Image (cartoon, rainbow, N blue to C red):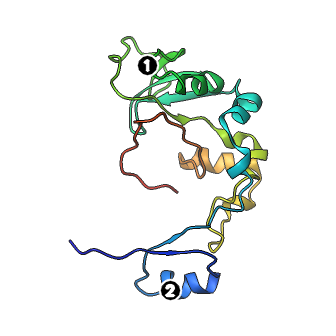
Amino acid sequence: MRQVRVARKSNVSVEEIAREHLHGLGSPVIITDGIDHWPARSKWTFEFFKNYYGSDFASAWLGTGSDIGKITKLATYIDFLDKPLEQLPGIWVGKDGLPIKVAPAPGASPLYLVGWNAFQHPELYRDITPAPYFVLDLVSALSPTLREIFEWTSRRSFTAVYIGPAGSLSRLHRDY
């Protein structure tokens, strides 16, 4: 296996990224200050989500690739994070969204909240800049309704918020 050194950079220009990391064979880079300007960095807390969006329905899954999850309220899930040994209130469902007949064994895996459509609230989308600042992001130019239509027809979320307790994991995956 060949190892590649990954550069860490901050305050990089669009030209530098294009020249040193995107053209030719390219090279990996970690941009250490890429989201420092996001309002979400200071605004988004569990209390903020509970106060403004706590009544939203959300689904917590036994990992990102699981076929079993639990439908609950966002505030209920956030409260559950403080006491993960207790049972999360809600309804067990399968990938098809229908209730399942037999609940999974306790302690199978931590419940990982990957099923909350945070960006149904357009004001949350304004708190982030999804694409790196050096890549043109056409998705951000779409209205929330059109973005939702594209996500529904492609069966892919372009932007998501995942929340999990200590010990929760997602399998190796790529984000779009």
Counting from the top left corner in percent of width and height, residue 156 is at: 54, 48
Tag of residue 67: none
Q: Is residue 145 visible?
A: no
Residue at horizontal 68 percent and vertical 51 percent from the top: 41
Image location (x, y in percent) of residue 5: 36, 76
Q: Could you tell me the amino acid type at mark 2?
A: Glu
Please rate how many residues cluster around mark 1, counting C-alpha atoms within 10 Å: few if below 14, some from 14 to 19, many from 20: few
Left or right of 161, for residue 119: right
Instruction: Report, in whole angstroms, how far the alpha carbon at label 2 lies from the one at label 1.
Output: 48 Å
Visible in this render: residue 35? yes
Of pointers 2 and 1, the one earlier in the residue sequence? 2
Residue 124 vertical placement versus 68 (above, below): below
Three-letter amino acid code at disc 1?
A: Leu
Q: Using residue 42 as the reference point, say whether residue 168 is left or right of it.
A: left
- In the image, residue 157 sits, relative to residue 141, either above or below, namely above
Residues at discs 2 and 1 in contact (Cβ within 8 Å): no
Query: In the drawing, does residue 133 fall left or right of residue 112?
Result: right
Instruction: Give the percent coordinates (x, y) of residue 58.
Output: 59, 28
Query: Secondary structure under badge 1?
Result: loop
- 135 in relation to 119, above or below: below
Identify which residue, 51 or 115, lies in the foreground: 51
Residue 69's x, y, as percent? 46, 25
Report the residue marked by disc 1.
85
Q: Quadrant of the N terminus?
A: bottom left
In this view, the residue in front, 161 or 102, is: 161
Place residue 66 in its image quadrant.
Answer: top left
Q: Which mark is residue 20?
A: 2
Q: Badge 2, how many Cα within 10 Å: few under 14, some, many 20+?
A: some
Please identify the quarter of the rendering in which residue 67 is found. Answer: top left
Q: Nearer the viewer, mark 2 or mark 1?
A: 1
Q: Residue at x 65, y 24 (%)?
A: 75
Q: Residue at x 62, y 66 (%)?
A: 34
